[in-house]
Amino acid sequence: MSARTKILDALQRAGHDEAGATALLARADKEPRDPAPNPDFQETLAGGHALIVEYGDCEMHGSCQCGKRFGITTPDASLDTFVSPWERHCMTEVPRG
C-alpha cells in the first residue's frame, strides 16, 4: 500500500468522505515545502512552468511543467530548440496572478 493510499485512508477514518480526503491531499500537494521560504523566489507546485527536457528513444522531448509540449529534437541538436517556444508560452499563454 502506498503512502498516499494510507494518508487517504487515515483522512477517511478521521471523518472525511472520499472526495473531501482526495481534495485535501491534492491541496497539500500544491503547498510549498520550503521551511524557510524566500519571499523573492516563492516556491510553487501549483501551475509551475519549468522547462522540462526528457530523453526518449534517441530523441529529446521538450515540454512545460504544466504539460504543454514543445516538440522533439535529436540529442546532438541544441536544447535551445525548446527555449523560444517555452518563453513564448510563459510570456503570452500563462495567466498572470
Image (cartoon, rainbow, N blue to C red):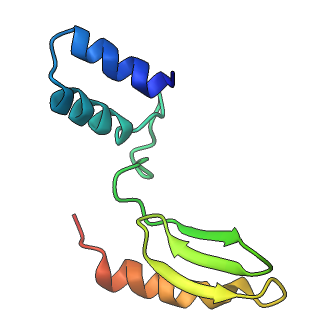
Image quadrant in which the C terminus is located:
bottom left
In this orientation, which residue lies closer to the viewer: 58 or 29?
58
Query: Where residue 53 sits: x, y (%)?
Result: 64, 71
Q: Is residue 21 left or right of residue 59?
A: left
Number of numbered discs present?
A: 0
Picture quadrant where residue 61 is located: bottom right
Q: Is residue 13 left or right of residue 65?
A: left
Picture quadrant where residue 31 is located: top left
Q: Is residue 41 left or right of residue 16?
A: right
Check the image and report above or below for 39 versus 11. Answer: below
Check the image and report above or below for 25 versus 50. Answer: above
Outermost residue to the right: 76
Outermost residue to the front: 1
Q: Residue at x 43, y 47 (%)?
A: 43
Q: Residue at x 44, y 37 (%)?
A: 37
Q: Residue at x 42, y 88 (%)?
A: 88
Query: Where residue 54 sits: x, y (%)?
Result: 67, 69
Picture quadrant where residue 33 is located: top left
Query: Where residue 39 sits: x, y (%)?
Result: 39, 45
Check the image and report above or below for 38 versus 49. Answer: above
Q: Residue at x 16, y 19 (%)?
A: 16
Q: Is residue 4 left or right of residue 74?
A: left
